[in-house]
Image: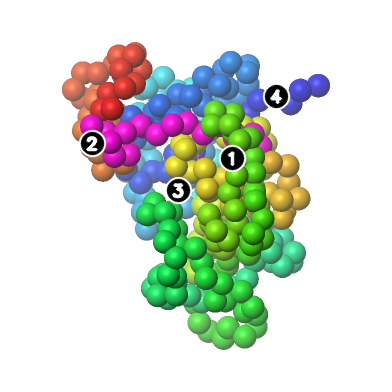
């Protein structure tokens, strides 16, 4: 028997939702509906330095206004509660411990500045620097009282591949297209890559629909699934929405926030029929 489709919306409350989010989320909802499956809402509120409480309520309100409907979420509960990441630290600690015991990660004392200084190769402006491997041989016991993060050791030279439901075959070379990445930050907060995998697995997500800016994150996450021995969901990456200058929409584009559009009298139906706004 086929597994029931389970998709998710995973917004971070770091600002008002904009058209780009709405379009990706809409694709997620359409795919869940077409498959006769479930759609869950997960509030990705781990990074307390970036998110603001006031955005959580507005996020839920904007999503509902737009026509999103979820059967599990922070406001409605569900089988895999809690749905706020800030309440799921145990899940992330367990995943971290498993990565530690399998020796997939190492403690890293480098600051962003250290890495910048050590890296000479060009890198995608958008993505993180390729980590030069300075701390790969570190032992936790030898670190003393210095602050450290946990980094995932990627299999250098290996092509990590997956078939994307929208963008087709994807191949990224470990150590070249992306390097060792942080799974747990020096300030004690789990990194997005780890939290996302731990939650998508725990919540039995069968397909992840997200923006194409996260393709390289997806391959990092595939390595985490592999290390943890968990089955990998399907992926569907949506094209990004661009503004009039051809730049990616970000939360700072307030004029394209759902909130503003709504105040200006736009309706969700009209917005959907104008998806090309700003292109
Ligand atoms: N909270 C992440 C974001 O808003 C989720 C990305 C994802 O995994 O879909 O960028």
Q: Which mark is residue 170?
A: 1
Evaluate if marks 2 and 1 touch, with contact meaning CB atoms under 8 Å apart.
Answer: no
Task: Quote the CA–CA distance across marks 1 and 3.
Answer: 29 Å
Between discs 1 and 3, the one toward the N terminus = 3
Say which residue label 4 marks: 4
Question: Magenta includes 90?
Answer: no
Say which residue label 3 marks: 45
Q: Looking at the image, which residue is at 40% across and 34% down?
A: 240
Q: Which SS class for mark 4?
A: loop
Between discs 4 and 2, the one toward the N terminus = 4
Instruction: Examine the residues drawn in magenta and state their main secondary structure.
Output: loop
Task: Quote the CA–CA distance across marks 4 and 2.
Answer: 41 Å
Residue 170, percent from left and from top: 59, 40
**Range drawn in magenta:** 233-248
Task: Quote the CA–CA distance across marks 2 and 3.
Answer: 30 Å
Question: Magenta includes 245?
Answer: yes
Between discs 2 and 1, the one toward the N terminus = 1
């Amino acid at each position: 028997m086929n597994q029931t489709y389970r998709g998710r919306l995973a917004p971070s409350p770091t600002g008002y939702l904009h058209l780009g989010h709405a379009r990706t989320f809409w694709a997620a909802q359409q795919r869940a509906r077409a498959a006769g499956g479930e759609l869950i809402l997960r509030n990705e509120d781990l990074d307390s330095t970036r998110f603001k409480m006031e955005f959580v309520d507005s996020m839920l309100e904007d999503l509902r206004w737009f026509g999103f409907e979820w059967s599990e979420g922070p406001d409605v509960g569900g089988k895999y509660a809690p749905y706020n990441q800030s309440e799921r630290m145990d899940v992330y600690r367990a995943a971290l411990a498993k990565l530690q015991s399998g020796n997939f990660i190492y403690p890293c004392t480098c600051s962003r500045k250290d890495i910048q200084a050590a890296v000479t190769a060009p890198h995608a402006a958008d993505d993180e620097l390729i980590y030069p491997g300075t701390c790969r041989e570190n032992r936790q016991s030898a670190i003393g009282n210095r602050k450290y993060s946990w980094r995932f050791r990627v299999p250098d030279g290996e092509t990590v591949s997956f078939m994307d439901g929208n963008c087709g075959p994807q191949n990224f070379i470990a150590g070249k297209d992306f390097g060792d990445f942080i799974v747990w930050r020096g300030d004690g907060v789990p990194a997005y890559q780890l939290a996302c995998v731990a939650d998508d697995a725990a919540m039995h997500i069968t397909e992840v629909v997200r923006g194409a800016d996260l393709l390289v994150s997806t391959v990092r996450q595939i390595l985490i699934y592999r290390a943890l021995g968990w089955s990998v969901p399907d992926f569907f990456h949506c094209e990004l929405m661009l503004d009039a200058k051809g730049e990616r929409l970000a939360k700072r584009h307030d004029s394209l926030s759902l909130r503003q559009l709504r105040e200006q009298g736009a309706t969700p139906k009209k917005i959907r029929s104008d998806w090309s706004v700003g292109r």
